[in-house]
Amino acid sequence: MTQSRGQSAIEAMANVAIGWLIALGTQLLVFPAVGLQATLAQHLGISAVFTAVSLMRTYALRRLFNARERTV
């Protein structure tokens, strides 16, 4: 079964949104533990960049695997 581009995008966004919450929480705990200081705004900015990259990666991989499945 293949997914439409829209379904792939929705799945990628849901996956990344959950990952973002986990990553932000991890940052808030780990940064101080290793001596890094950041404001909440800086944490949000850092996580936004990584979230955007993760969303693009997840979507691209999903489309690649769907395209591969159609040729097999």
Image (cartoon, helix red, strand yellow):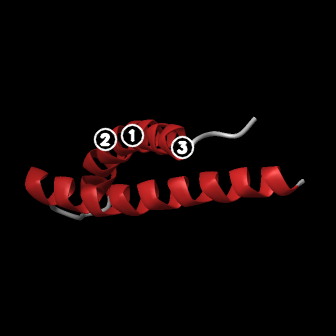
Amino acid carrying mark 3 in the image: Ser
Q: Find the distance from the CA under tag 2 to the CA under tag 3.
A: 26 Å
- Nearer to us of marks 2 and 3 is 3
Q: Which mark is residue 22?
A: 1
Q: Residue at x 32, y 61 (%)?
A: 34
Q: Residue at x 9, y 54 (%)?
A: 41
The residue tagged 3 is 8
Mark 3: few, some, or many residues within 10 Å (few <14, many ≥20)?
Answer: some
The residue tagged 2 is 25
The image position of residue 63, as x and y in percent, is: 62, 55
With 9 as the anchor, is 27 left or right in this view? left
Q: Find the distance from the CA under tag 3 to the CA under tag 1.
A: 21 Å
Q: Element at badge 1?
A: helix
Most distant residue in the right direction: 72
Amino acid carrying mark 1 in the image: Ile
The image position of residue 27, as x and y in percent, is: 31, 51
